[in-house]
Image: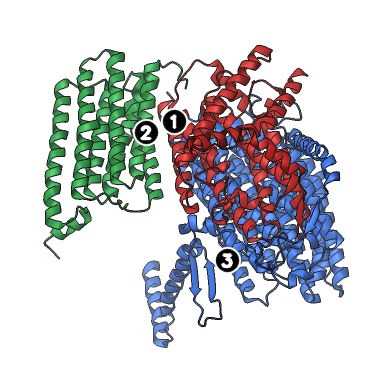
Amino acid sequence: MSGWILALVQTALLVLFAPLLSGWIKWVKCKFQARRGPVPWQPYRDLAKLFRKEVVVAQQASPLFRATPYLVFSVTVLASSIVPAFAVGLPTAVIADVIVMVGFFALARFFLSLAGMDLGTAFGGMGASREVTVSSLTEPAMLLAIFTLAMTFTSTNLDAMVYYTLTQPFHIYPSFIFAGMSLLLVAVAECGRIPIDNPATHLELTMIHEAMILEYSGRHLALLEWASMLKMLIFGILICNLFLPWGTALHIEPVALSIGAFTLVGKLMGLGLALALAESVLAKMRLFRTPELLSLAFILSLLGMLGHVILEVH
Amino acid sequence: MYLYLAHSGVLLALLAAVVSLPIRSISTGARMAFALLGLSGLATAASGCMGMLTGCSLNLVLPIGLPWLNSHQHLDPLAGFFLLLVGGVTAIVALFGPGYVIGSVSDSAAARTLAFFTGLFVAGMYLVILAADAFSFMVAWELMSVASYFLVAHDHHQKENVAAAFIYLLMAQAGGLFILLGYGVLAGFGTGFTFADMQAAALPVHWQHIAFILAFIGFGMKAGIVPLHVWLPQAHPAAPSHISALMSGVMLKVAVYGFIRFCYDLVGTFHWQWGVIILLAGCASALLGILYALMQHDLKRLLAYSSVENIGIIYMGLGLSVLFASNGNPALAALGLVAALYHCMNHALFKSLLFLGAGALISQSGQHDLNRMGGLMRLMPITAICFLVGSISISALPPFNGFVSEWLTFQTALQGTVLDSGITKSIIAVAAASLALTGALAAACFVKVFGIAFLGQARSKDTLQAHEVSFGMRASQVLLASGCLLLGIFPSAVINSMQAIPTELLGIGLSQVEAGGWLWLTPISARASSYGAPLVLFGISIAWAGAYLLLHPRRRKTPVRFSPTWDCGFGSLSTRNQYTATSFSQPIRRIFRPIWPIDERVDPPETAAEGGRYSIHIGDWAWEKLYLPLGRMIQRSAKLVTKIQGGNIRTYLAYSFFTLIVMLWIVI
Amino acid sequence: MDIVVLTMAEQVILTLAALMLFTSFLLLAQTRLVTLIHIFALQGALLFATTLVIAFTYGRHHLLISAALTLGLKVFFIPLKLQKLVTHLDIKREVEVVGNPSLIMFGAAALVLFSYYAVLPIRELSMLATRNTIAVSLAIILLGMLLIISRRKAVVQVVGFMCMENGLMFAAVAATQGMPMVVEMGVALDVLVAAILFGIFFFQIRTEFGTLDVDKLNLLKEVE
């Protein structure tokens, strides 16, 4: 029973602190650009403002348009409940299959693309078309990287993966280095950050995610924005805990849990720093240059898999 | 004995064929025929279910057929599974049929021939599955092919339908010939033509390879493996929509049944080369199928190419299974087989659902072209929701059924680490990555289909006339959609009921499936992977309810306001502003350009007032590089042969003269 | 199939092997000449690191001299020389790749698999834990050759030749813990001489033809 309560608490904490990660990245970026910038907890104020505002829906909208924000948000919250963040061994771990998690994000993306096409505007169709193109290019790289990891862990269960690394003696796996690099590129593409998509733009030629949610307002928009911040948090936790899980609690006791929480916060802050640095240094790529970047991700995961087969199996 | 139930299903189907022949009125004839067809479907489905669940095999020898080879019939778990599939989908299509036929067919003779050949077609499919000797199998196979030829050519006033039917018949006959040769090889080394004799036959290794190749090509032609698939995108759009549902949802599975029966049951020994061939053919079909589907804007042609993709996925599961079986891991081979069979069932359900929905759309809007549809969600809500369920299922998204079979296929591929050869392991890993690419492209394709057809604004005036379809048509779609959801939520129950099939074919079932309880699907072991489908649905509902209730006070304070779409101040938006099917897939067309033969033309405007013309035509490389040259070669050689017929009487006398000399020489 | 039996040094060597393979892939994908030279220098640095690790782990101190030679030649001298050559010949513009890049990448991956398959019997002969690196070395050699045949600029072909030599050195160092000192000195001298000769020849070719595009050397044939 205490396991279930802890799982619920973990989900609530992740949902509550997702905007803080987004705000931290923005704050660091502003510091790099020698600007004063908003405070790290600005996203909370933005969300609160959006929740207060009136919702305006176009007359031609179908019921799917109004249902999508709730669906996307609930699927993302479910994904956040299964990712191993502070501790392993929670009861939700039994559905914590990494392919299932990829399926959740695919479901959210499916409905978001449909919502973009719902009103018959050109922006929505463009956003949907680009989004499905980019996501179909990231899937093979992501899956091959996961396979490479699963070949060593002999499991696709996220909990089992983290548990394996925590309990086995430290070992450098070349395949993990490549799989990690590939997953970083894939995470950038999936979360819609530079150089794939600019989260701060409203120019039609440069939007992907923004174009799909252009017609939303008020609490619907707040739910969608929150879902995308939560998705970025989930990907960050995945990358941190799959490759550098030390600090995550093995048993459910207060000391271990607090160590787990602290190390997670530290790792996420570091990852956010790296992302902000990358976003400040790189420029957004033209849409038809993104296949080159994503094929680089695929080559990296392919090299990881080949490295495992050639170097790591005796 | 439930084998008799299956045979009564066959008789009911034959009765359905002839019952409407004397009846003049289209609606009465259609209703009676489809009622009988529905009953036959239910009967065979029930018998198939019992056959699968009881796990034992029934045999029967009927006193018809050749005198020295009476017709042997059997019903074992594998046949039971496929009978359940065929019967179930037939029963639901029979529910859809009357509304559709009455609405679209106006000529009484045409309606009667349609009913006649539909009954024969369905009876043929049942008999293929029930056959236990090569002769009955081939007779039933030919019955199935020829009856469906007439169904494809039903609307013969359109020239392209006739051409499509001809290609279909040609390839069906060629495939049948290969299958016959395959059976011939097996019978030649055995003692007879019954399946039992063939099972006992001991073939030398290179004859096993030959038999496999013959069966692969023969059954592959009917199933639709690239490059043998070219008849599919031509024949499915030509046939009436409920027939397309039967052909795509069920007939392709009968071909898969034949292939599984041949490889697993009749030949019996596995080689790793076979596994690699099946796996790579499956990969190619899956990738090329979905890429071609993305570029289509004719709805039924798109669904046909999507069937090619799903058959590819089924073959990938089978290839993995054969690889494991040849390596001596029967448990993992069972997993691969179960994954492939689950996908067979899933595809039968969601593809039929999509074709029935397409039939409803086409009959209501009068358009085949996606680029002329739009905004149909408000006009046909039930059809839209069922089509949405079908689209989510075919895109392999949780919690529906398509996700379960793809997840099982991934899990099977992941177990490839037990194989010894590093090369095979790498091939399996890359195949799994291509399966992921296929899944993502399928989602893209069906976002396009649903978004263009149902969402947005209507792109042509005819579409505005559409309204919701009749009760039977709606009910059949709702039943299929519920089937998709149920198979998605209770996978472990379904797999447990299928346990008899791998036990019969490979000797071992999936013992760990419910190791964690009925809620979790744990195909290999609880530690390796698990999927709790009911919990996923529960979790999504809880989170949704939570978000909805938390925002309830906000909803009361600031209710939703409706207003026209924001047009950036440029003036009213027209329906021409929105994306079309062709433009939606343009980024993918550009990235994967070499895959299709694209003929794109832009004609600049002649005067300043016009807008110019843009035309794009996407062909099929298999057609242009393989079949057209083959056709030309056959015609050239035929022309050479016609030189024998010179017309000169002295030449003909000379033929007789020389034949006489040769015969005298040989005899004396 | 357990790899936890390897010591930290052996894990580091395997990681360096994988990174060297990655630099070979990067070379195949790179179109700019200066970046190409930098990646080649990086590959040399990784080779230097591997030589150092082997020298210290297995106590082969003559490998330290080899490592110093690698550092001096492959990481500093030859790349600097090539870079000066490139600037002097004023060919810093983009390189054209023969055939499309995705096909070359998949060909490279297939070559890696093929080299793995080819050295499977040889692998059984070595008792060392790092015997898997033989496949990687062969792959690097083959990828260097792929680089030579897929590019048109002569400077890139020199880099490809140097990569092949890197792969050979790597095989010698990781799989057999170094060759006799005399052989290593000889090889290093050969490479240095080759680099100098290449530089001289390039000047002459450039003066004669006005370009360093090797496809234009077809003009040399006498039969029309």
Seen in the image, is A241 located left or right of residue B125? left
B344, C18: nearer the viewer:
C18
Mark seen at residue B204: none
Q: Do the residues labelled 1 and 2 touch (CB within 8 Å)?
A: yes
Q: Give the labeled residue for mark 2.
A: C116
- Judged from the image, the secondary structure of the residue bearing numbered disc 1 is helix
Q: What amino acid does circle 2 point to?
A: Tyr
Q: Give the labeled residue for mark 1.
A: A309
Q: The red chain is which one?
A: A
Q: Chain B is drawn in which colour?
A: blue
Measure the alpha-carbon separation of dots 3 and 1. Answer: 46 Å
Q: Is residue A251 visible?
A: yes
Mark seen at residue B170: 3
Residue beneath the point at 20% across and 35% down: C78
Q: Which chain carries label 2?
A: C
Indicate the position of residue B489 as horizontal and vertical percent values.
75, 38
- Dot 2, crowdedness within 10 Å: few (<14), some or many (≥20)? many
Indicate the position of residue A13 as horizontal and vertical percent values.
69, 27
Seen in the image, is B333 located left or right of residue B482? left
Residue beneath the point at 52% across and 38% down: A35
Measure the alpha-carbon separation of dots 1 and 2. Answer: 9 Å
- Dot 3, crowdedness within 10 Å: few (<14), some or many (≥20)? some
- Judged from the image, the secondary structure of the residue bearing numbered disc 2 is helix
* A97 in relation to B482, above or below: above
B569, B480: nearer the viewer:
B569
- Dot 1, crowdedness within 10 Å: few (<14), some or many (≥20)? many
* Quarter placement of the C terminus of chain B: bottom left
Q: Do the residues labelled 3 and 1 touch (CB within 8 Å)?
A: no
Q: Which chain is green?
A: C
